[in-house]
Amino acid sequence: MKTNDSNYFLKPSDFFLTRKPMIIKTVLGSCVAITMFCKRTETAAVCHAMLPSCEEDNACRNGICRDGICQQRYKYVKCVIPEMIRRFNRLNIDALELEVKLFGGADMFNSVLSSRTVYHVGTRNIIMARQIISKYELLVKNLDVGGAQGRKIFFNTQTGEVWLKRLYREDIQACVEQAQAV
């Protein structure tokens, strides 16, 4: 993670919540970013989730979860959205006050699990995000998901605005290398 007073680069499996005016940037391929913004308090949060959920049904019994909380909760869509809502609740912000936006989930990196099954990570991330958002009765104000192109987003934590740039595969690699060099 690279940060200065007004910028932050959000890496995969990362989460950020702030009341400071900042621009949070991230690069998405099959991952999804969910932004949440409360206008009343000017509190903003964003996550960069890599996978829909733990692959192992009993992951909590195997040490990934402790005290009912997933230790890798920012990595999984199913875990990070409830965590974001919990963090806003601790600040006395009701989930109904949140402006929610969803980005990413491109099917750029499909892998074959068997001779007949293709694992579409991006699509599965989108489906899980929509399920969890619906479970908490949140409304998505804006979204840009799916397809085969990556995205670079810029999240203004003071206004809740998100700017988006579509990326091709080579652009994503260049963005990641640039972020690591800073």
Image (cartoon, rainbow, N blue to C red):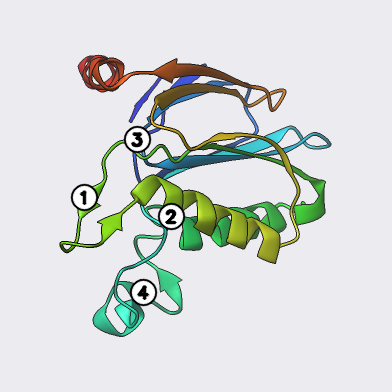
Q: Which residue is mark 1?
A: 111
Q: Which residue is mark 3?
A: 11
Q: Is residue 4 visible?
A: no
What amino acid does circle 1 point to? Ser
Q: Which residue is mark 4?
A: 65
Where 51 falls versus 65 (above or below)?
above
Q: Which quadrant of the figure contains the N terminus? A: top left
Q: CA distance from mark 4 to mark 2?
A: 22 Å
Residue 14: % across, % down? 39, 43
Residue placed furthest toward the front: 116
Left or right of residue 65: residue 85: right
Depth-wise, is mark 1 or mark 3 nearer the camera? 1
Q: Earlier in the sequence, mark 3 or mark 4?
A: 3
At numbered mark 4, what does the secondary structure look like: helix, strand or loop?
Answer: strand
Left or right of residue 42: residue 74: left
Q: Are marks 4 and 2 in contact (CB under 8 Å)?
A: no
At numbered mark 1, what does the secondary structure look like: helix, strand or loop?
Answer: strand
Q: Residue at x 81, y 53 (%)?
A: 96
Residue 79: % across, % down? 48, 62
